[in-house]
Image (cartoon, rainbow, N blue to C red):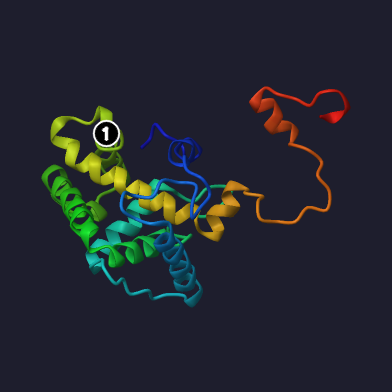
Amino acid sequence: MSEMSRRQALGVLAALPFATALAPLPDGVDAATAEAASRAAEEALAAGPPYTPKFFTPQEWRTVRLLAELVIPRDERSGSATDAGAPEFMDYILSEYPDQQLAMRGGLAWLDAESERRFGTRFVERGGPERTALLNDIAWPEKARPEMKPGAAFFSRFRDLTAAGFWSSPMGIADLQYRGNTGMAEWTGCPPDALRKLGVGYGPGGR
């Protein structure tokens, strides 16, 4: 986790068209449900606390909120995954897909069990350095040791859900500086910064 910045994470996660999020949805989750989950998360945030999870237990909810914060923390441009309602998004998705509940619940249990094995306490009760050390062992599936593979598979799926929840929210869309779906009185061409990044330019006459 310490090796990947939030902006680098966006490059890894944002790989699909802008349907409900510029981030991959977990296998088996359809776009319509993701859209409904985004709306439900937005409504939950607007209603204010407390939010009562439909799927997660209170202990799991604490872990999910902390883990989402670590995946997409607050930065100078926008709020965190928790600020955007990603945990509520995940809770809605999992309440709609019973076949995915075991993997999530098992992954959270694995995380606590590994934390207790290493440090003697659950994941949420550890300090930052210990949490970072544990997550570094499961953040890169291709580098994970064999005994860490179950945790790495869980964490990859958790990141996908967190990213989908964040970047399908109003906060996440603003974070991306997405400029679609808006009227333009005048087209002035592709922004110069984008042209330079792509290594292209307009020909004679601005074409």
Residue identifier under label 1: 141
The answer to whether residue 48 is above or below residue 163 is: below
Is 72 placed left or right of 170 in the picture? left
The answer to whether residue 173 is above or below residue 189 is: below
**Which amino acid lies under the numbered mark 1 shown in the image of this protein?**
Pro
Mark 1: secondary structure: helix
Residue 14 position, x and y percent, is 47, 42
How many numbered discs? 1
Q: Quadrant of residue 92?
A: bottom left
Q: Is residue 113 visible?
A: yes
Residue 58 position, x and y percent, is 25, 68
Quadrant where the image shows the C terminus: top right
Q: For this rendering, which residue is in front, 16 or 55?
A: 16
Residue 151 position, x and y percent, is 21, 42
Is 196 placed left or right of 36 in the picture? right
Point out the residue furthest to the right here: 205
Question: Residue at 78% of width from left, 38% of height from top?
Answer: 189
Q: For this rendering, which residue is in front, 55 or 31?
A: 31
Question: Residue at 46% of width from left, 75% of height from top?
Answer: 48
Q: Can residue 80 be seen in this view?
A: no
Question: Residue at 37% of width from left, 47% of height from top?
Answer: 160
The answer to whether residue 66 is above or below residue 37 is: above
Residue 143 position, x and y percent, is 26, 27
Mark 1 Cα within 10 Å, few/some/many (few <14, many 20+)? some
